[in-house]
Image: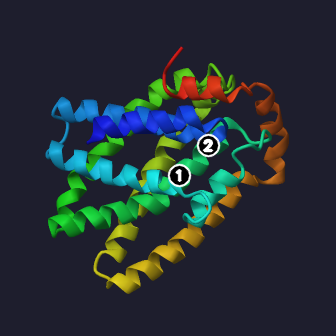
Amino acid sequence: MIADTAKDLRTVALAAGDASGYFPALYSRVTARIGASIDEGAFADGPGVDRFATCFASHYVAAADDHLRGPVCWQACWNVASDQRLLIVQHLLLGINAHVNYDLPRAVVEVADERGDLLSIRHDFDAVNDVLADTYVDVIKDLDRVSRWVNSAARLGGGRAFNFSLRLARARAWQAASAMYPLTADARRGYADELDRFVSVLAYLITRPPPVLRPILGLARRLEERDTTKVVASMLGER
């Protein structure tokens, strides 16, 4: 269940040894917060959200267990995990991109197949956005300890932009799930392959920002912690 999932993600993060540990560390924290929200009665169907969140996380775990033969969009994350030129935020965005834009639609469809109804998931799917927004506030505080430009960017509107982008990505994930759900098994596989290729293009754009931004990103990188162990600990909310 979701509590065990959060622990498993934490284990993956601590064992990574490079920037590929950043996303599972953040994901472990978000998953733990969703578990706490379930216990507090924040969702209309707590057990259902638990099953959904666990199913969703299983897609990441499967990809992490098979770096060489997994989805191309996840391979894009592993391929740059040792690239010191990328910002911590870029590594996080690569994981978020693959998990939300590629894994999430497929997880929605799987759970919808179990329930026999896509729309029954929608209320709790939307409610998760509120949990993500709350978690973001705490994450930014800890991220600024290892990426000492983040709070300044958040105060200038970067926080609102991130939350908006995440909500937009989740909205698009729902649209993709809605398109995939009525398809045959073969058509779903074809749709997922096309989605994987599209998300891989987005990953490339994350690692290759426009030239006008590169001097700014270079300056930001000088303000970041290079010890991956310390970054993972910060993402986990540990001192």
Identify the residue at image location x=42%, y=32%.
29
Report the front residue among 203 and 6: 6
On the image, the x and y values in percent for residue 223 come to 76, 24
Near-viewer residue (10 or 118): 10
Q: Nearer the viewer, residue 188 or 207?
A: 188
Q: Which residue is depicted at the point 50% across and 39% down?
A: 12
Residue 118: in sight, yes or no?
Answer: no
**First in residue order: circle 2 vs circle 1:** 2
Label 2 Cα neighbours within 10 Å, binned few <14 / some 14-19 / many ≥20: many
> What residue is shown with label 2?
20
Which quarter of the figure is the N terminus placed in?
A: top left
| Residue behind mark 1 | 64
Instruction: Check the image and report above or below for 84 versus 171.
Output: above
Q: Residue 17 vs residue 95: left or right?
A: right
Q: Tell me if label 2 and label 1 are in contact, CB under 8 Å.
A: yes
Q: Residue at x 76, y 31 (%)?
A: 220
Mark 1 Cα within 10 Å, few/some/many (few <14, many 20+)? some
Of 174 and 68, nearer the camera is 68
Q: Residue type at mark 1?
A: Ala
Please tell me the numbered disc located at residue 162: none
x 48%, y 62%: residue: 102
Q: Amino acid at mark 2?
A: Ser
**Quadrant of the image occupied by residue 104:** bottom left
Q: Is residue 228 above or below residue 213?
A: above
Task: Tell me the element at label 2.
Answer: helix
Element under label 1? helix
Q: Is residue 21 left or right of residue 10?
A: right
Q: CA distance from mark 2 to mark 1?
A: 9 Å
Where residue 9 appears, as percent x and y from the top left, is 44, 39
The answer to whether residue 93 of the structure is visible from this angle is: yes
The C terminus, quarter of image:
top right
Residue 148: percent from left, percent from top? 69, 22
